[in-house]
Image (cartoon, helix red, strand yellow):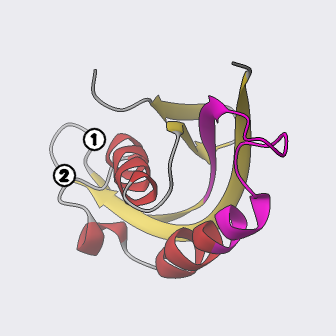
């Protein structure tokens, strides 16, 4: 059985702040993310149709988080928590989620692959 990896990307701008060790006032980031799916090809030769995946990410991630304060959505609004939140949200609605990668800057990111 042939398996493939398929990745869809998205982006949004949101703000977050940190207390404790990080201790930062609210500040914005232009977050980018990748959701990677892993699974078998179907009889037509593809794993997932890109169109509903793109629509879901646009509606449920990009539009929901655009301009938001991540502290309202996440108890600890770190990039790590954001990657886990995106992973959980996507995996509740779409099959074959393998990993989520979130970057708050182009040169650093967090990758979450779910619980083992």
On screen, residue 68 above or below 74: below
Residue bearing mark 1 = 22
User: x, y (%) of residue 69?
Assistant: 37, 75
Q: Which residues are magenta?
A: 31-55
Residue at far right of view: 45
Residue bearing mark 2 = 19
Judged left or right of residue 104, residue 80 is: left
On screen, residue 68 above or below 116: below
Query: Which residue does the image show at 30% across and 56% down from the upper left?
Result: 77
User: x, y (%) of residue 37?
Assistant: 61, 39
Q: Residues within 10 Å of mark 1 (few under 14, many from 20)?
A: few
| Disc 1 element | loop
Query: Which residue does the image show at 44% across and 78% down from the upper left?
Result: 68
Query: Which residue does the image show at 58% across and 79% down from the upper left?
Result: 59
- For the residue pair 20 and 4, the one nearer the viewer reads as 4
> Marks 1 and 2: in contact by CB < 8 Å?
yes
Reply yes or no: does residue 51 show up in magenta: yes
Q: Residues within 10 Å of mark 2 (few under 14, many from 20)?
A: few
Alpha carbon distance from label 2 to label 1: 6 Å
Reply yes or no: does residue 112 show up in magenta: no
Specify whether residue 25 is in view. no
Specify whether residue 42 is in view. yes
């Amino acid at each position: 059985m042939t398996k493939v990896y398929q990745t869809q990307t998205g982006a949004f701008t949101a703000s977050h702040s940190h207390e404790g060790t990080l201790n930062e006032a609210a500040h914005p980031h232009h977050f980018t993310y990748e959701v990677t799916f892993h699974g078998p090809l179907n009889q037509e030769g593809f794993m997932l149709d890109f169109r509903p995946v793109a629509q879901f990410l646009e509606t449920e991630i990009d539009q929901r988080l655009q301009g938001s304060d991540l502290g309202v959505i996440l108890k600890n609004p770190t990039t790590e928590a954001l990657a886990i939140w995106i992973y959980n949200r996507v995996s509740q609605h779409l099959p074959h989620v393998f990993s989520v990668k979130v970057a708050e800057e182009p040169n650093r990111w967090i990758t979450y692959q779910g619980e083992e």
